[in-house]
Image (cartoon, rainbow, N blue to C red):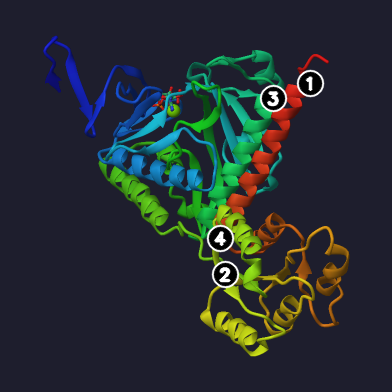
Amino acid sequence: MDKKSGGQMDIKIDGQDVGKLVIEGKTKCVWDLPKLPGHVLLQSKDRITAGDGVKAHNMEGKAAISNQTNGKIFELLNSVGVRTAYVKSAGEKSFISKKCEMIPIEWVARRLATGSFLKRNPGVPEGYRFNPPVQETFFKDDANHDPQWSEQQIVSADFNVNGRRIGQDEVDIMRRTTILVFEILEKAWATRNCALIDMKIEFGVDSKGDILLADVIDNDSWRLWPSGDKRLMKDKQVYRNLTTVTEADLLDLKKNFKWVVDQLDLLPRVSDSLVVILMGSPSDEEHCKKIAKYCKDFGLQTKLRVTSAHKGTDETLKIAAHYEGSGDKVVFIAVAGRSNGLGPVLSGNTVFPVINCPPVKPDNVTQDIWSSLNVPSGLGCTTVVYPESAALAAAQIHALHDYLVWSHLRVKQLNNFVTLKVADKMIRDMEI
Ligand SMILES: Nc1ncnc2c1ncn2[C@@H]1O[C@H](COP(=O)(O)OP(=O)(O)OP(=O)(O)O)[C@@H](O)[C@H]1O
Ligand SMILES: [Mg+2]
């Protein structure tokens, strides 16, 4: 801390100049950032708490570990297109976020029944699996132990948050987003052979009135069972379960928290799923580039090749054999005008999926499309006519094994849902 000429204190946290303390909670301090209007610095504390703060301990090193966990999770969510308040890490114990007014609801998603769900739903056995995940909401009110609220209670509360009214549409969007975020993190953790059992998140509204996933997601936010085995749990539940807390317990807890960060470091961050777009002629380049652009939007790797199954059959087969031997996971997209030999020849000579996307135009579509559709027996190539459809079809195939591509697709579907909701609201409220 340095003294300014006017006698005011200059406070630096993780090297950032901070302004006034906006709020201090149990585990974090929120600071204004005078040089970055509309943003705040969220600084984690070396503090672990449970039972609405009744149980609380200092845990040296927790702030840094929580900040890393949160950063890795939000960077993943941002990279697949989830709309979040998280901007970037600011240092060891803090990160920069869009300044939000928070919606005072905890949004919970559960894959398996455990913990408080069992008490609230007697008769449901522990481990009962929800398909899709169950979504619950709790009003943030420590003094009353965060009571569960129904959708109707939230809508009736008619919250006005940063100028945005929280009505049915907003609740629908947050419900869907909660399940989406859970499923993305569940799939991410599955790559580390860990079962994400449940999770809690919060939303805020920024100065533009946008609803953003905000606050933090760290090892306090979920239940995480390696190999799906409750006895191996790594999350804050271990702390909740302790009746007395010794120094040795705190060290063990810290090891768990560190283990979680180390696992997150091992998550694949970039998809290695490959889409090879083969064109029968260089004149199809523009059409192929459109397909590649859509593929990239889903996080896919792309490669363009020129090969004619009619005029250079050997080469076409060599290309197919090259990718068969490469060990890569590949979907072929065949782009051939007029008579499409390319897709069917590839389909007959590789086990990789083949999608035809002929560059048809209104004047030739009725003729040319049949060469892609009316293929000899024994061939299973599929056919679409729009570049976006070809990319989507390839992405849906890769989503079976690639959580990043799956996440991109799911976020796109959520965004479609939100766009339609917004359009519906506008037209509903319009005076005709
Ligand atoms: N992007 C953000 N902009 C503004 N405030 C935020 C943002 N993200 C989180 N906050 C708020 O920061 C405060 C401090 O966080 P902390 O988690 O320590 O609080 P807490 O004691 O757990 O209280 P709460 O029960 O409200 O979470 C919380 O009120 C939280 O809602
Ligand atoms: Mg909190």
Q: CA gap, disc 2 to disc 4?
A: 13 Å
Whether residue 126 is visible to the viewer of this picture, yes or no, is no
> Which residue position is annotated with label 3?
151
Q: Is label 3 within 8 A of ligand 1 (CB to nearest ligand atom)?
A: no
Label 1 vs label 3: CA separation? Answer: 22 Å
For the residues labelled 1 and 4, the Cα–Cα distance comes to 38 Å
77 to the left or right of 95? right
Residue drawn 60% across and 64% down?
Answer: 401
Q: Residue 304 carries which label?
A: 2
Quick check: can you spot residue 104? yes
Observer-nearest residue: 122 or 104? 104
Q: Could you tell me which quadrant the N terminus lies in? A: top left
For label 1, count other residues whose C-alpha is less than 10 Å away and answer few (under 14), some (14-19) or many (20+).
few
Check whether the beta carbons of the residues at disc 1 and disc 4 lie within 8 A of each other.
Answer: no
Query: Residue 32 location, x and y as percent?
Result: 33, 21
Q: Closer to the observer: label 2 or label 3?
A: 2
Q: Residues within 10 Å of mark 2 (few under 14, many from 20)?
A: some
Q: Relative to residue 351, is residue 394 depicted above or below?
A: above
Which mark, by number, is residue 428?
A: 1
In three-dimensional space, the C-alpha distance between marks 2 and 3, rounded to whole angstroms, equals 49 Å
Within 10 Å of disc 4 (Cα), the crowding (few <14, some 14-19, many 20+) is many
Name which of mark 2 and mark 3 comes first in the sequence: 3
Amino acid type, callout 2:
Leu
Residue 111 spot, x, y in % from top left: 62, 46
User: Does mark 4's beta carbon lie closer than 8 Å to ligand 1?
Assistant: no
Residue type beneath disc 4: Leu
* Sequence-first disc among 1 and 3: 3
Give the numbered dot on residue 300: 4
Q: Nearer the viewer, residue 245 or 226?
A: 226
Picture coordinates of residue 220, whole percent (x, y): 44, 38
For label 4, the SS is loop
